[in-house]
C-alpha cells in the first residue's frame, strides 16, 4: 500500500467512513503492523493540532472584531482607579507641606520657651508641695503624740494590773 493510499485509508478510518470487511481488514493491519499503528497515532495528533490551531485563529478573529467595536482608550480612562483628592494633593505638595509643618512646630516651641512654659518650678506646684510638706509634718507630730499617749496608757494599765484591789465583804447596803 502506497503512502498516499495509506493516508487516505487512515483518514477514512478516523472519520468513521470505513464499513464492513474493509474496516475489519484495516483494523487487522493496524494490529499486526506497528508502523501503521504509529502513523495512525501521528495522524490523530496532527488532526488534533489542526483543530486546536483552527480554534485559536477563530478566537483571535473574534477578539479582534470585539476590539474593533470597543474604544479601548476610552474604557481604560473610565475604569482606571483614580486616587482621591487628598492623595493627589500629597503627591504634588508633600515637600511644601513638610516644610510648613516644620516651621509651625519650631514656632510653637519658640513661643513656649519665651513665655516661660518650660520652667520646672511652677508656682502652683511649689505651693502645693509646701502644703503637702506641712500636712506631713503635722501628721508626724500627731503620730508622735499618739504614740506617747499609747505608751502612758500601757504603763498605767501595767501598774493597775499589779496592784491588789483588796478583799471586801458585805452586802453593799449602807
Image: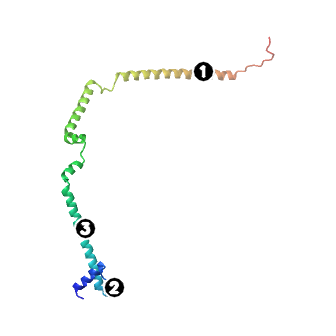
Q: Left of 80 or right of it: where is 163?
A: right
Q: Up-down: is 40 above or below 93? A: below
Residue designated by label 3: 55
Q: Up-down: is 41 above or below 139? A: below
Q: How many neighbours does mark 1 have within 10 angstroms: few (below 14), some (14-19), or many (20 or more)?
A: few
Residue designated by label 1: 152
Which quadrant would the N terminus be assigned to in this image? bottom left
Chain-order first, disc 1 or disc 3: 3
Q: CA distance from mark 1 to mark 2?
A: 138 Å
In what element is the residue under mark 3? helix
Question: Which marked residue is nearer to the observer: mark 1 or mark 3?
Answer: 3
Chain-order first, disc 3 or disc 2: 2
When asked about the image quadrant of residue 125, the answer is top left
- Across and down, in percent, residue 37 comes to 30, 83
Question: Which marked residue is nearer to the observer: mark 3 or mark 2?
Answer: 2
Residue at 21%, 37% (x, y): give it: 97
Chain-order first, disc 1 or disc 2: 2
Q: Nearer the viewer, residue 48 or 92?
A: 48
Residue designated by label 2: 20
Which quadrant would the C terminus be assigned to in this image? top right
- Across and down, in percent, residue 117 comes to 30, 26
Residue at 25%, 25% (x, y): give it: 114
- Across and down, in percent, residue 119 comes to 31, 26
Q: Up-down: is 169 above or below 119? A: above
In what element is the residue under mark 1? helix
The tally of labels here is 3
Q: Nearer the viewer, residue 151 or 1?
A: 1
Q: Left of 161 or right of it: where is 102?
A: left
Question: Which marked residue is nearer to the observer: mark 1 or mark 2?
Answer: 2
In what element is the residue under mark 2? helix
Q: How many neighbours does mark 3 have within 10 angstroms: few (below 14), some (14-19), or many (20 or more)?
A: few
Q: How many neighbours does mark 2 have within 10 angstroms: few (below 14), some (14-19), or many (20 or more)?
A: few
Amino acid at each position: 500500500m502506497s503512502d498516499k493510499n495509506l493516508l487516505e485509508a487512515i483518514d477514512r478510518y478516523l472519520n468513521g467512513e470505513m464499513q464492513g470487511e474493509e474496516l475489519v481488514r484495516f483494523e487487522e493491519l493496524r494490529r499486526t503492523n506497528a508502523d501503521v499503528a504509529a502513523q495512525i497515532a501521528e495522524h490523530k495528533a496532527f488532526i488534533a493540532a489542526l483543530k486546536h490551531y483552527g480554534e485559536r485563529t477563530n478566537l483571535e478573529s473574534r477578539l479582534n472584531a470585539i476590539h474593533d467595536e470597543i474604544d479601548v482608550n476610552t474604557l481604560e480612562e473610565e475604569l482606571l482607579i483614580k486616587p482621591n483628592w487628598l492623595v493627589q494633593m500629597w503627591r504634588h505638595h508633600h515637600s511644601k507641606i513638610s516644610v510648613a509643618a516644620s516651621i509651625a512646630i519650631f514656632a510653637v516651641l519658640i513661643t513656649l520657651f519665651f513665655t516661660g512654659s518650660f520652667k520646672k518650678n511652677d508656682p502652683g506646684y511649689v505651693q502645693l508641695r509646701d502644703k503637702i510638706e506641712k500636712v506631713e509634718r503635722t501628721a508626724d507630730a500627731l503620730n508622735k503624740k499618739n504614740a506617747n499617749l499609747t505608751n502612758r496608757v500601757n504603763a498605767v494599765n501595767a501598774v493597775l494590773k499589779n496592784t491588789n484591789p483588796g478583799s471586801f465583804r458585805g452586802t453593799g447596803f449602807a
